[in-house]
Image (cartoon, rainbow, N blue to C red):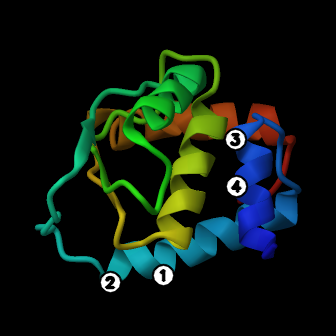
Amino acid sequence: MSDLDRQIEQLKRCEPLKESEVKSLCLKAMEILVEESNVQRVDAPVTICGDIHGQFYDMKELFKVGGDCPKTNYLFLGDFVDRGFYSVETFLLMLALKVRYPDRITLIRGNHESRQITRYMDSMMNACGNMAL
């Protein structure tokens, strides 16, 4: 099992990653996301999910109903964070799945990933400790 697969399984159990793993995951995701076009082609069939808002266990239920990656294509329509208690865990699992299955996971930024990002980063700092992200 690769480190990334282990991290995905750990995140699915809502267990925190090490600081170094979070940084590495974010860097890998950034490499993928900056290369993607602002307009994305998504192959059908696809499971479309919107407004997760940090509801980690609801997201897990979506995967249970829709099927696990890589068997299912997923399109997340933004608003990944805010409101729920598990914004950090939710977003990290999405990032890990995007890194592992870049052609199966499509992430579209919502309004909670822009203006609200400052509040999200505060949540990240509280959840992960005082680290320089």
Of 78 and 15, nearer the camera is 15
Q: Earlier in the sequence, mark 3 or mark 2?
A: 3
Residue beneath label 1, please?
Answer: 31
Q: Nearer the viewer, mark 1 or mark 3?
A: 3
| Residue type, numbered disc 1 | Glu
Disc 3 is placed on an element classified as helix
The residue carrying pointer 2 sits among few (fewer than 14), some (14 to 19) or many (20 or more) residues within 10 Å by Cα, namely few
Q: Earlier in the sequence, mark 1 or mark 3?
A: 3
In this rendering, would 106 be left or right of 85? left
Of 131 and 51, nearer the camera is 51
Identify the residue shown where x is 36% and y is 54%. 72
Disc 1 is placed on an element classified as helix
The residue carrying pointer 4 sits among few (fewer than 14), some (14 to 19) or many (20 or more) residues within 10 Å by Cα, namely many
Q: For residue 65, what is the image quadrant?
A: top left
Distance between the alpha carbons at the discs numbered 4 and 3: 6 Å
Residue beneath label 4, please?
Answer: 8
Distance between the alpha carbons at the discs numbered 1 and 3: 23 Å
Image coordinates for residue 74, horizontal then vertical, percent: 32, 51
Q: Residue 12, labelled with which disc?
A: 3
Distance between the alpha carbons at the discs numbered 2 and 4: 23 Å
Distance between the alpha carbons at the discs numbered 2 and 1: 7 Å
Disc 4 is placed on an element classified as helix
| Residue type, numbered disc 4 | Ile
The residue carrying pointer 1 sits among few (fewer than 14), some (14 to 19) or many (20 or more) residues within 10 Å by Cα, namely few
Disc 2 is placed on an element classified as helix
Of 66 and 107, nearer the camera is 66
Residue beneath label 2, please?
Answer: 35
Question: Can residue 77 be seen?
Answer: no
Question: Can residue 29 be seen?
Answer: yes
